[in-house]
C-alpha cells in the first residue's frame, strides 16, 4: 500500500520561507515522478513543481525563482522549499506521485495516481 504524507506547512508573513516535506512509502521512490500541487480557497488545484525520474524539473510560472524542488532518495522524501512567499501562495499543498509523468508533459492530475492529504500554507501580508 502506498502512503503519501506531507508536512511542514504553516503560517508566515510575506517574504518568509517554508520547507515542505513529503514522505512516500510503498513504491520505488526512484521510479516515480513526483510533484507538488496547491489549491487556494475557491480555486482549482494547480501544479506548482514537479520532478521526473530523470530529475528534470518543472515549475509554474508564478513560483519560478522562488520555489525549489528536491528529493532525498535514502529518506524516500520529496521537498519543496518556498522562498519570498506572497499572499497568493496561500493554499493547501499536496504531494503526488506518477509512474509515467515527464517534465515535458502538462500538469494533469490524472497522471498522478498517489496523493497525500495536504499541508496548509498561509501567507499574510
Image (cartoon, grey):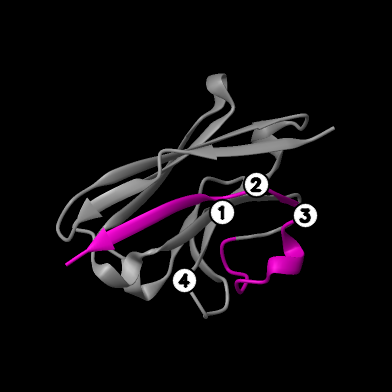
Tag 3's secondary structure? loop
**Residue 116, numbered label:** 2
- The magenta stretch is 103-125
Vertical placement of residue 44 versus 120, above or below: below
Give the mark nearest the N terminus, 2 or 1.
1
Mark 4 lies on residue: 40
Q: Are marks 2 and 1 in contact (CB under 8 Å)?
A: yes
Mark 1 lies on residue: 94
Q: Nearer the viewer, mark 1 or mark 3?
A: 1
**Residue 115, numbered label:** none
Residue 83 appearing in the image? no
Report the Cα–Cα distance between label 2 and label 4.
Answer: 16 Å
Report the Cα–Cα distance between label 2 and label 3.
Answer: 10 Å
Give the mark nearest the N terminus, 1 or 4.
4
Q: Are marks 2 and 3 in contact (CB under 8 Å)?
A: no
Report the Cα–Cα distance between label 3 and label 4.
Answer: 21 Å
Report the Cα–Cα distance between label 1 and label 3.
Answer: 12 Å
When asked about the image quadrant of residue 91, the answer is bottom left
Q: Residues within 10 Å of mark 3 (few under 14, many from 20)?
A: few
Mark 3 lies on residue: 113
Amino acid at each position: 500500500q502506498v502512503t503519501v504524507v506531507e508536512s511542514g506547512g504553516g503560517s508566515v508573513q510575506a517574504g518568509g520561507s517554508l520547507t515542505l516535506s513529503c514522505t512516500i512509502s510503498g513504491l520505488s521512490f526512484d521510479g516515480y515522478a513526483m510533484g507538488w500541487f496547491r489549491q487556494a480557497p475557491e480555486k482549482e488545484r494547480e501544479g506548482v513543481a514537479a520532478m521526473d525520474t530523470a530529475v528534470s524539473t518543472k515549475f509554474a510560472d508564478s513560483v519560478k525563482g522562488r520555489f525549489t524542488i528536491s528529493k532525498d532518495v535514502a529518506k524516500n522524501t520529496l521537498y519543496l522549499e518556498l522562498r519570498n512567499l506572497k499572499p497568493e501562495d496561500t493554499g493547501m499543498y499536496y504531494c503526488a506521485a506518477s509512474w509515467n509523468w515527464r517534465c515535458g508533459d502538462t500538469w494533469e492530475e490524472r497522471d498522478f495516481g498517489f496523493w497525500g492529504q495536504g499541508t496548509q500554507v498561509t501567507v499574510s501580508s
